[in-house]
Amino acid sequence: MIETDYKIYFQGKKITMLGLGLLGRGVNVAKFLAELGVELTITDLKSKEALEPALKQLKKFKNIRYMLGKHELADFKNCDMVIKSAGVPLDSPYIAEAKKNKIPVEMDASLFAKFTPATIVGVTGTRGKSTVTHLLEHILTRAYPKHVFVGGNVRGMATLPLLKKTKIGDIVVLELDSWQLQGFGDSKISPHVSVFTNFLPDHLNYYKGDMSKYFDDKANIFKYQKEDEVLVLGDQAVKEIKARFKGRINSEILVAKKSIVPKTWKIKIPGEHNRANIACAILSCQELDVPKDAIKKGVESFTGVPGRLELVRTVGGVKYYNDTTATTPDGNRVALEALGTKSKKNIVLIAGGADKNLDYSDMAKLVHKTVKALVLIEGAATEKLLSLIPKNTSYPVCIVDNMKDAVETASDFAKKGDTILLSPGAASFGVFKNEFDRGDQFVKLVKKLK
């Protein structure tokens, strides 16, 4: 499509946005559409008071109508399009109403993908997608300055407004969770280069315990690829994907084995799981014709992503790591394996929280073997974990209901040479606004320590 097509397409359209939120993505989509002259209805179950920070940013637009604190079926009958936010229930009666009335249902990232002339690299997987996304951005930005953009599931960012910036020859790296990939499935499109890092249990509260539905959404990243496009599979994902889609994948498949990462490279991000992430980035960059030396320099200079095994600071010889995005037991596992030692227990772990209908038996065993103290944030996942940890533990176990108490308690247990690790293995809702709020609170408190 030529650059101005999207402007013509959206002008004068009547669009309902299902979900505004507070993380910035919905606000930026709304701004973009309002500026194009869209007649916009924004509907959100949150109240006007709860959404005040977002509403304040949209105050100047006279072409936005709000339906807050509830949804009305009428808003899904008489419009040209519905744009839904991530996490809208699979059985939403409002999405069903739109589809019944033959109204197209779109999402931010997939709608962008329909219009942009840029090359799209999509990254998904249960774990590692954020690291791979930002590592790719880091390498590509240095190889192709001013031609690389990042979007998708990136904090505070909306992807649709990137239409104003992207052009032929540009590369857009999109981190895509299972919810955003619903939009790609509805639109029957996939990225030009797709990365699938791994597939592990997650979001089973949303998918009502059905891993097949979770996988089906994830698989949209490659389902609609063409023969001249590429699918990069993390080693762990190969068996699962080939078993489910044998003979039905159109694109070229490349397997990212950890062994392709040279042992001589000086890598700053810890853990074997990150060697798997780096392997995915290397193969993707090779497909995008990035010189080998540029890939090496990019990998070696990459220091990681905030909230993902992020070393916040060292205080009194104690290292504090923020791994708030470890929202599953497997996320917690890779953190403990990356930072723990076999010779001694030197990790004070801050974990627990809300449950996503996941199994905590393996996490309980690993925690029991590796930590010197355990601080748990209250929630259903914490209750599960507690029921699985042996009662006669040799290490202290404390339950708190806020991050301040968590950091103070963990600090009391730690001594020089120890590591305090926030790696919850659980969701954040209930005690925190979201996982980012959880990590932000941890970082803020750690930076105040003396």
Image (cartoon, rainbow, N blue to C red):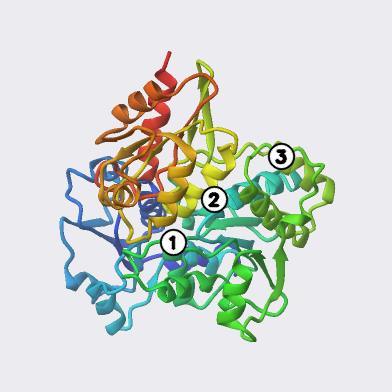
Residue 346 location, x and y as percent? 51, 30
Q: Of callouts 2 and 1, which one flags the residue occurring earlier in the amino acid sequence?
A: 1
Label 2 or label 1, whichever lies nearer to me, is 2
| Separation of marks 3 and 1 at Cα, in angstroms | 34 Å
- Considering every residue shown, the one lying at the far bottom of the view is 247
Which residue sits at x=76%, y=46%? 143
Q: Secondary structure at mark 1?
A: helix
Q: Secondary structure at mark 3?
A: loop
Look at mark 3 in the image and give the residue it sits on: 267
Q: Nearer the viewer, residue 401 or 118?
A: 401
Q: Of callouts 2 and 3, which one flags the residue occurring earlier in the amino acid sequence?
A: 2
Tag 2: amino acid: Ser
The label on residue 130 is 2
| Separation of marks 2 and 3 at Cα, in angstroms | 17 Å
- Considering every residue shown, the one lying at the far top of the view is 450
Q: Nearer the viewer, residue 32 or 408?
A: 408
Look at mark 1 in the image and give the residue it sits on: 108
Residue 184 location, x and y as percent? 49, 71
Tag 1: amino acid: Asp
* Vertical relation: 432 (above or below) 28: above
Q: Quadrant of residue 407?
A: top left
The quarter of the rendered structure image containing the N terminus is: bottom right
